[in-house]
Image (cartoon, helix red, strand yellow):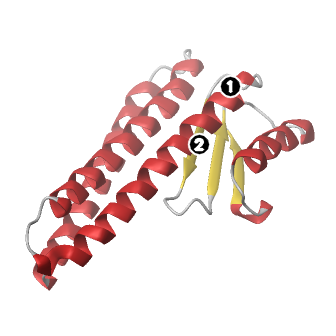
């Protein structure tokens, strides 16, 4: 892949991230205008975050599919790298979905899990005013069971 194409790809990805962030802020600002409806703010956060995550991933996968569709022996290494990256993204998506489902089964009403493509950082956001030590241990045990990761690379937040 030429230097120009790489730069265009990076600029495109940054543009998509900026659009997703603006959309996220806009949706949250719209929901925050009604202070009597606090639940809508939380639901909006989780829904818009999932939408942002999915939009970004869809774009990344579409870009990788374009690389995979390129013909010619000179693109063989780029196709192989794109295939590996696409599989990492799919694995991260599956892990996120699994962890979110398991955490909801443990009684957390609203959960957002993000996993980076190399599966070495996990962030968990739960809808709760305050997390107890038991909640934190429960969340970490589920993550440790499903993903081989060190505790310092797990972030647990509540909103």
Q: How far across and down, in percent of the image, does residue 63 sit?
A: 21, 57
Q: How far across and down, in percent of the image, does residue 76 sit?
A: 20, 75
Kindly give the residue lying farthest to the right in the view shown. 133
Discs 2, 1 touching: Cβ within 8 Å: no
Q: Tell me: residue 7, above or below residue 128.
A: below
- Residue name at image x 45 percent, y 36 percent: 50
Mark 1: secondary structure: helix
Label disc, if present, on residue 104 of the rendered structure: 1
Q: Decide: few, some or many residues near mark 2? Use Cα within 10 Å; few <14, some 14-19, many ≥20.
A: many
Kindly give the residue lying farthest to the bottom in the view shown. 3
Judge left or right: residue 131 versus residue 30.
right
**Residue 22: in sight, yes or no?**
no
Mark 2: secondary structure: strand
Judge left or right: residue 131 versus residue 26.
right
Picture quarter with the N terminus: bottom left
Disc 2: which residue: 113
Q: Tell me: residue 40, above or below residue 119.
A: above
Q: Decide: few, some or many residues near mark 1? Use Cα within 10 Å; few <14, some 14-19, many ≥20.
A: some
Nearest the viewer among 136 and 121 is 121
Q: Place residue 148 in its image quadrant.
A: bottom right
**Disc 2 or 1, which lies upstream in sequence?**
1
Label disc, if present, on residue 89 of the rendered structure: none
Q: Tell me: residue 153, above or below residue 49.
A: below
Q: How far across and down, in percent of the image, does residue 23 sit?
A: 31, 41
- Residue name at image x 53 percent, y 63 percent: 118
Nearest the viewer among 132 and 115 is 115
**Residue 67: in sight, yes or no?**
yes
Q: How far across and down, in percent of the image, does residue 101 sit?
A: 63, 28
Judge left or right: residue 143 versus residue 4.
right
Picture quarter with the C terminus: top right
Q: Place residue 110 in its image quadrant.
A: top right
């Amino acid at each position: 892949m030429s230097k120009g194409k790489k730069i265009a790809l990076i600029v495109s990805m940054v543009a998509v991230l900026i659009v997703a962030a603006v959309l996220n802020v806009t949706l949250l600002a719209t929901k925050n205008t009604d202070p009597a409806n606090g639940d809508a703010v939380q639901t909006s956060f989780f829904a818009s975050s999932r939408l942002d995550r999915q939009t970004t991933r869809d774009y990344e996968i579409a870009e990788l599919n374009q690389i995979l569709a390129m013909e010619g022996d000179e693109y063989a290494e780029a196709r192989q790298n794109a295939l590996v990256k696409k599989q990492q993204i799919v694995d991260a998506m599956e892990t996120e979905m699994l962890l979110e489902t398991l955490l909801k089964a443990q009684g957390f009403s609203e959960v957002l899990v993000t996993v980076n493509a190399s599966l070495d950082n996990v962030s968990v956001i739960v809808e709760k005013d305050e997390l107890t030590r038991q909640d934190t241990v429960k969340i970490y045990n589920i993550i440790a069971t499903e993903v081989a990761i060190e505790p310092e690379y797990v972030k647990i937040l509540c909103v």
